[in-house]
Structures are given as structure tokens and as C-alpha cells.
Amino acid sequence: MNNVLAISGIVIKELYRRKDFYVLFVLTALITLLLGSVSFFNDAKIARYLKEVCLLLIWISSLVIAISTTARQIPAERENRTIFPLLAKPVTRGQFIMGKFLGCWLACGVALVVFYLFFGVVSESRGRGDSSAAGLSATAAATDASSKTDEHDHAAAGSEHHNEHETPETTGQRSVVLNYVQALWLHWMMLGVVTAMVLLGSVVLSAPSVSITISFIGIIGILLLGEHLNKVALRQPQPLQAIIYTGYFLIPHLEWFDIRDRVIYDQPAIAFGDCGLATLYAIVYTGLFLFLTWFVFRRKTLTL
Amino acid sequence: MRRASPYLVLGLLLTICFAVATTIQPRTRAWSDRAKSGDVLKMLLGDGRRMFANHFFEQADVSFHSGYYPSIFDRREQPGKTAMASGKDEHDEHDEAAHEKEMAFRGQPRDWIEAFGRHFRVTEHTHLAHGQEREILPWLRISAELDPQRVDTYTVAAYWLREKLGKIKEAEEFLREGQRNNPDSCEILFELGRLYRDGRHDPQRARNVWELALRKWNAQESGKAEPNYFQLEKIAVHLARLEEEAGRFSRAISLLELGKKSSPNPDALQKQVDEIKEKMRARESAPQAPAY
Amino acid sequence: MSVILKTEKLRVEYASRESRSGTKVALNGLDLEVRAGEVFGYLGPNGAGKTTTMNVLLGFVHATGGEARLFGVDVREPIARQRIGYLPELTYYYKFLTAEELLRFYARIFGIPRGEADRRIDSLLKLVELEHARSRPIKTYSKGMQQRVGLAQALINNPDLLILDEPTSGLDPLGRMKVREIIQRLKSEGKTVFFSSHELGEAESVCDRVAIICQGELKAVGKVSDLVAQYQCDLEKLFLKLIGYQPQGVS
């Protein structure tokens, strides 16, 4: 584990010493603030368009960071030959893969926290009253959903029960915060799957540009079309139907982790049980992709 | 000389570029509308901006439904009017039922992936209310910027601004902008008339605007193989109501008769005609005030 | 003296389109033994199989046949690399790190405690004369400085066996002298050094024993003085003879 953490530390250092993250963050902040400064029909309470744009930019930026950082890790190590002094130490290839994955994933997590803090500040500065009001119903529904699905998890569900001394406003704000935290968590989990997928791609396709392009197409494709593949399959003749349906059951359903609509439209928070299951799903797929990456990489010949 | 030669070549190339540019530039204006356009968006996107405008108009409807919206895979057939747009028209229970049916696009989940995925989606069909309708406005504004010839954008935005947000001034400004971009639009004139009557309580201006709308309709639609009678009915009926309120009963009756031709519910209009006729008779039979 | 590096009938084949059989033999039944405390020179012309041997010893390439052991452990086991230091021919390090960060990273890989790592980093940077530049990113270093960082990283775990791949190539005479001094110093500390080189003079001056390899096969192995006596010529002529070089007459 020590080796894995040491390698991941290098990846994180590399990310914050490169300018990609800062550029993307400044770009996101700039566009959001620019749009925030526009007055639509002299109404200062309009907020959702800003949330929508800000979250879209955060999603795009996070995918760019995750894919571009991960895709170049192993090819760059091979191209710059930094992999040789490293693997000449008592480091297994599995530890190398895990270190790279963990570094990229943690770096994405840090970037996400910064992005979501910015999002929180932006959305709180606009339409605060509306969010709190909507949050009231959201909390009530979340409590309901939690108690339905997590009947055994009294601690989790209990934390959502209204306290006699709490004002409705605080409860509403708490729900909004809960929504943000869930969005951040699920987003991060999804980036775990994405990072593992891209790592596998970077081992199979050693040219980073090819790996980045294919990863982008694949991941955007899953995010946009993944949930509709079953409907598409039903309209196709056999054997195409069977092929598409198989693909539908095989691909990681990354779109589950995109709960932007729930955040933007102040929907009730997701039940903790569902959130946990989605996390488990992400872990399984991440593990699967990491195993495949190791399987491909373990016997790969590295020549000086 | 050897040192200066790269700079001389550079200077020569720049001169050639400048000369070619000045020669070609006047010709490019004839090549396409895009080059002529003073609008940056039109220049950048060309006619593709209409596609984006359509997307943002739909985005406003998505926002109106708080994210509960069918994707292209959920729509079996081309959707009709958006709920946001139909909201501004008078509609009955039948329309609402049809809308509910249209929005019940999810149905039963086909498999466990779809069933589980629904926990992360907005699954309740709601419409914005209590002033939250304002959230659709930025998308309509952007849509209008991208496609100023799309009339719907102005009328829908003006309706919500006037009716739900009480922003009469902003609604009027937006409609005026729409009118500048679409000078022959009866729809915009009709909406402007409603704004004058209901928002400004100025029936005289409303009457002028609707009369103009009627003239424009006659000029544009009457000669067509399939004229837009729905529009005609709206203008005629609203104008008739104004005329009735002003006591010009015979004009009101003739407008209602005009509306009846195209109305899906002519009996209701006939009933109104009968009521006005009744009023006319009552006025005629009323004793004249003695002249002094 | 105990044998700490041993290869037995080591064979490595690569897929090759040029060859009719579809494979190219890079190493063919290589038997090699390096004993504790000696400086062992591994000599051969370009393409002889020196780098392939190193690749196998470091686990970058898996042998097609035979076996290779470090400290009695199969080279495929990562633990075999716990007591070795490796200096590649060129400087392959994370250029965005400083020398200190790079050494700390490798120290962590070897599981060296923080206090001990600090002490070793200080002494190694002093040894390679890079104390003044310890906080500068490696990308700002000259080639000689980068090579010295490489040497420092190879020594971070206080290794018993040092594998050096052409350690003086590309260095100026002063740089070469310093590397030689360091090798001598390591030898005096009882370390084993296994290094490949083209520089026959260098091998002659620092090596206890040398091996000459050509076309993947071991041609000769032994003390320089013994080989010279056996073939009755100097090392350069011996080298040329063993690799099959025929001098052409000048007309």
C-alpha cells in the first residue's frame, strides 16, 4: 500500500504542477460569473440557468481532467522512460497500476471539491430563498425515501428526522447541502470508473492522443445514450437487438451518477440505500477495469 | 543584405496578403448572407443557430417541467406544442389530459437497470409555479438571440412575464423587440394587444393593435390554401370582446361571426352573438332620455 | 565469495518480422555469475544483448528460457530488487520534481523511515555535489547534474548490488572521473557493481572481472589480466577478436 500511495502522490504533484486544472477552473469560473452578471428581464432571482451552466462546465472540466490526466500516465511513463527506474525498485506492476489509478482519482476528487465549492457559492448567492423553500419538500421526501429503503439503517435515516428545535429554513438548507454532497460523491465515484476505463485504454492503445479521443467518445456516448440503449434495441431486428441489449447490460451505466437535474431543480435527495448501491456498482466496475488493466500490463515487455 | 532578407520576404508576403485581401473582400459579400450579416451569431453559426435556438426553447420547457422531460428516445411521435407554450393559451381539461398522457412517457421499467436508474432521475411531472416560472426566461432570451425570427419565443416569454411575474414593462419591451424582428407577425401583435388590455388596462391601444393584427392576417393568410384560422379566431374573439365592452355591438357581432368560421366550438360563439344581440335589443328598446 | 547475480541458460526471443522464423534471439543460453564485492564489467558491441540482459535482471522483459536470480531470488519477484540500485544510461526521471522530492519518493518506495531518509538524502546530495540545487526542478539541471541525480537515486536504499547501464556515456571527462571515483568508493565499501560499457579503458581501470558478449552469446569472462594473458593481446584487440571484427586492408 505504501508503494501505491507513493506513486499516487507523484501523480497528484504532477497534476497541481501542470496548468490544466487551473485553466479549466478559471474558464469555468469566468463563464459562470460572466453569465451570472447578465440580467434577464431585470430579475435578480433567476438562478437555475446559472446552476445548469455551472454544473455542465464542471462536468466537462472534470471529464477533461480525468481523461487527459489518466490517458497520458502510462504512455508518458514509457515515453519518458521514467517507468524503468521506478520498476527497477521493488514495485510490482499491480502496485504501479493501482498507484496511477489512485493518484488520478484522488486528484480528480480534489479538483471536484474545489469546483463544487465554487458551485455552492454561486448557487447560494442567487435564489437562496427559493432553494430553501424547495429544499423543505426535498428534505421531507428524502426522509420518506430513506426510511422506505433503509429501514434497517436507523442511524442514517434518523439523521434526517426533523428536530423540534430546528427551523424549517435550516432543514431546507441542510437538504440543499445534502443534495450537493450526494452530487459530488456520485460524480467522484463515476470518475473512478472513468479513470479505470481510461487506464485500461492507455495500456491497450499506447498513443495518448488515440486513447484520449476514444475514451472521450466512449464515455460521452455512455453518458448520453447508455440509458436509452434498451429502447433502441427493442426497435431493431435480430440479431442486432441481441447485440445492443448485450452492450446495454455490459457497459457501466455512468449516467446514473449524473444527478445534476436533481440539484438544479431542488429535487429530494436520493435515498442513502440507492446512493450506496450506486457506489458499490462503481466500485465493482472500477475493480473490473483495473483487473483488466493489470492483466494486459503484467506481461507487457518494456524495453529500454 | 543577408540579414535583412528574411524581413524583406516577410514584408513582401504581408503586402501580398493585404493586396489579395482588399481585392477579395468586396467579392465575399456576394458569396453568402452570412458574410453580409452584422450579427455576430449569424456570422459564426449561420443557419445552424436556428437549431441551437430550438434547443434552448426546448430547454425552457425542460426547466418548466423541472427536468422531467422526454428524450428523443422517449418520444414516439413528434411532440406538439410545448406545455410552456400551451400554458399561455386558454385550454381546457381535454388539453391537460392530453399533456399528461404525453408526459407519461416513462411507463413501466423494462429491466433492472432502467428501474434502478430512475432513482437518480426526476420522475415527477410538475410545472413551475409561484413565481418560479421566471427560471424559463433566460433560455427564451438566449433562444431569441439565436433566432430572432422565431415568434413563439417572444409571445411565450411575454405571457409569463406579464401574467405570472407582473413584469409588464419587460414584456412590452421584449414584444417590441420581437415586432422589430418580425414586423408582419400577427401573433406578436395579438400578444401585445393582450398586454395593453390586461396589463396596462388600455383598451384603446389594445384595439388598435388587434385591428392591425387583423389587417395583417387578412393580408398574409386570406390568400393561402390553408390559412391559420386558429390565429384569426383568437384575434377576432378578443377584439369582439373589446368592442362589446365599448358598446359597439354590431362590430362585435361581425367579429364573432368571423371567428365562428374557424372556431372548433362555433356554438359557444353563437351563444355570445345571441347575448350581444339581446343587449342590442335592450338598448334600442330602452327609453330615450328627453332632449332639452 | 557468494554469488549474488546469476543467470543460467538465459534465453530471450523477440518477435521479429525481419527474421524468417518470426523471432529474433537476443540472448542465447547466457550463463553469468557476479560475486559479492566485485566490480563486474559487461562489455559488448551495440546490439550484443547487454541491455536485454539488464532488462531481464530488472524485470522489464521476461525470459523465454533459463533463469536469472538476484541474491538467490528469481528476478520476476519484486523482492529481488529490494537490495539493488539501478542507474539507467540516460536520465529518466520525473522532471517536474526537485532532486530532493525525487529521492524522497524513491526512499518511500523502499520503505525507508522519514528520519533515515532525510539523513540519506542529505549525504547523497553531498556525495553527488547537488546540495546547492536540491530544491530546483530536475528539468532545470544540466545533463551532468541529471546523471548525478540518477546516481543518488540508485544509492538511496544503500544497495548491495548496483546495476549501471553505461554510467559515463555522454559525460565530460570530469564527469567520468567523478563517476569512476564513486564506483571505486562503493567497491571499497564492499558493494557489488555490475555495469555495462563501451569504454574498454574504463573497464580495464575499475573492473575486477569482465564479460564480453556478442550476438547474445557469452564470448569470454574473467579477470582482465587473465584474459590478456590468455589471448596474449591487450583488451581492445581481444575485444575486437572476440566479436569477430576483421580489419580491412587500406589500399
Image (spheres, coloured by chain):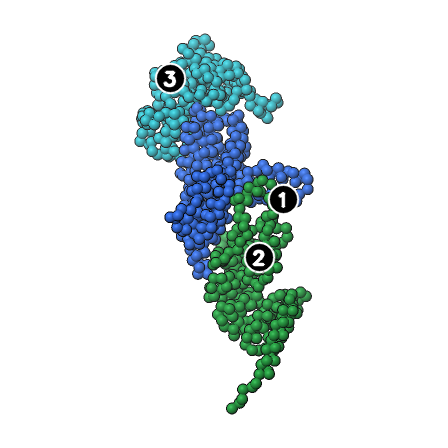
Which residue corresponds to the image point at 37% horizontal and 31% vertical from the top-left? C101
Q: In the figure, residue A9 lies in which quadrant?
A: top left
In whole angstroms, how far apart are the C-alphas of marks 3 and 1?
A: 68 Å
Hey, what amino acid is under mark 3? Lys
Q: Residue furthest front?
A: A164
> Which chain can be seen in cyan?
C
**Marks 2 and 1 close (CB-CB < 8 Å):** no
* Tag of residue B82: 2
Name the residue tied to disc 1. Answer: A232
Which residue corresponds to the image point at 47% horizontal and 50% vertical from the top-left? A137
The residue lying toward the viewer, choosing from C193 and A188, is: A188
The answer to whether any part of residue A36 appears in the image is no
Name the residue tied to disc 3. Answer: C191
In whole angstroms, how far apart are the C-alphas of marks 2 and 1?
A: 24 Å
Chain of the residue under label 2: B
The residue lying toward the viewer, choosing from B234 and C220, is: B234
Image coords of residue C97 (percent x, y): 38, 33
Which residue corresponds to the image point at 51% horizontal and 32% vertical from the top-left? A287
The answer to whether any part of residue C112 appears in the image is yes
Crowd around label 2: few <14 · some 14–19 · many ≥20 (10 Å): some
Tell me if residue A294 comes above or below residue C209 in the rendering.
below
**Marks 3 and 2 close (CB-CB < 8 Å):** no
Image coords of residue A20 (percent x, y): 44, 42
Mark 2 on the same chain as mark 1:
no
